């Protein structure tokens, strides 16, 4: 089969797509071409320092973000869904950057996993954006968090650090908080939004599992004990603290044992 392009160029194209619909389209096309064997496993271009961004939403520092309030009113639910859509939009770039930046250092299965994660994130974003439209809003209508790419910048030179922070800290935090958010949406009568978040939650368990598995593989290759190395990387690269309560069941299903995070619970790091 004649192949069109390389996996690095496909990942770079996703990162450089600014328009949300174009980014989703590029992500889906990259995943489809990779699954069909139409893309060469070649890393012939570098990933950009930062992804392209649309003109909206306005990006604000975390301390300037408006409070969302409870999930009971439609206005607060729109704000919640918009914030989640922004996280998923950034997660598309994080997944494709993972594949394009670090894929040459791992077996092909690493690309399989992270291209799949990126396709999931694109689908999650599309679902949330569609739900926002049904509620009379859309992605870009509200300001959003400016700091989501900081974790990528801080770990751009170390695949272990990227795996430790993005899936094993940031996405794992989603496993902790999403069930309560789903319950709040159900109580507010927004069953459609709750169903979307339930789908995202189930997928994110697989994403955390991929990160945990590849982190262990990378540590084994370097003959480093995974848990203490993870503690070192989190202290070095993550700003803030790992805040309980933890969803031990979902984290355990992802292979992220308490050995990793319990020892750092509540500790202010970075």
Image: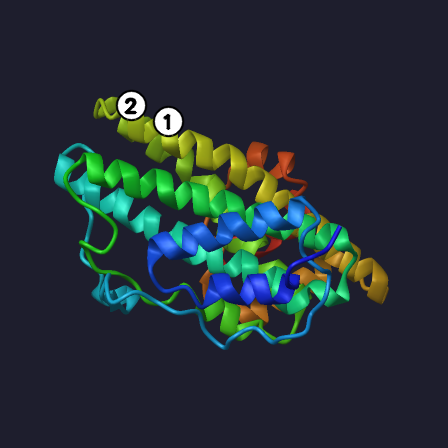
Residue 134 visible in image: yes
Q: How is the image coloured?
A: rainbow
The tag on residue 11 is none
Q: Does residue 3 lie above or below 116 as drawn?
A: below
Residue on which disc 2 sits: 191
**Count of marks overlaid on the render:** 2
Q: Secondary structure at mark 2?
A: helix
Q: Does residue 194 lie above or below 212 as drawn?
A: above
Residue 48 lies, in percent from the top left, at 51, 75
Residue 25 lies, in percent from the top left, at 44, 51
Q: Quadrant of residue 187?
A: top left
Q: Residues within 10 Å of mark 2 (few under 14, many from 20)?
A: some
Q: Quadrant of residue 219?
A: bottom right
Q: Are marks 1 and 2 in contact (CB under 8 Å)?
A: yes
Q: Does residue 104 lie above or below 21 as drawn?
A: below
> Could you tell me which residue is drawn at 67 percent across and 52 percent down?
38
Residue on which disc 1 sits: 195
> Could you tell me which residue is drawn at 68 percent across and 54 percent down?
111
> Could you tell me which residue is drawn at 65 percent across and 59 percent down?
4
State left or right for residue 15 relative to residue 117: left
Residue 7 lies, in percent from the top left, at 64, 61
Residue 252 lies, in percent from the top left, at 63, 36
Residue 70 visible in image: no
> Could you tell me which residue is drawn at 62 percent across and 52 percent down?
114
Considering depth in this image, is 250 or 157 the residue closer to the camera? Answer: 157
Q: CA distance from mark 1 to mark 2?
A: 6 Å
Considering depth in this image, is 222 or 240 the residue closer to the camera? Answer: 222
């Amino acid at each position: 089969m004649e192949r069109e392009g390389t996996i690095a160029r496909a990942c770079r194209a996703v990162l450089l797509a600014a328009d949300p619909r174009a980014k989703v389209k590029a992500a889906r096309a990259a995943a489809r071409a990779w699954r069909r064997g139409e893309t060469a496993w070649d890393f012939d271009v570098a990933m950009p320092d930062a992804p392209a961004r649309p003109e909206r939403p306005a990006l604000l520092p975390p301390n300037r973000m408006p409070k969302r309030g409870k999930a009971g009113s439609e206005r607060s639910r729109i704000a919640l869904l918009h914030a989640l859509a922004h996280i998923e939009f950034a997660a598309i770039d994080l997944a494709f950057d993972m594949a394009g930046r670090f894929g040459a250092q791992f077996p092909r299965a690493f690309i399989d996993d992270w291209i799949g994660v990126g396709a999931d994130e694109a689908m999650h974003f599309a679902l949330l954006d569609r739900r926002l439209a049904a509620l009379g809003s859309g992605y870009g209508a509200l300001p959003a968090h400016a700091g989501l790419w900081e974790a990528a910048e801080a770990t751009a030179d170390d695949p272990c650090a990227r795996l430790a922070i993005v899936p094993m800290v940031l996405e794992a935090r989603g496993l902790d908080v999403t069930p309560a958010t789903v319950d709040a949406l159900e109580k507010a009568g927004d069953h459609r939004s709750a169903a979307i978040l339930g789908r995202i939650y189930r997928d994110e368990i697989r994403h955390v599992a991929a990160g945990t598995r590849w982190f262990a593989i990378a540590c084994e290759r370097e003959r480093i004990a995974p848990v203490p190395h993870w503690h070192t990387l989190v202290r070095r690269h993550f700003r803030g603290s790992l805040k309980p309560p933890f969803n031990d069941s979902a984290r355990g299903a992802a292979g992220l044992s308490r050995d990793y995070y319990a020892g750092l619970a509540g500790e202010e790091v970075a």
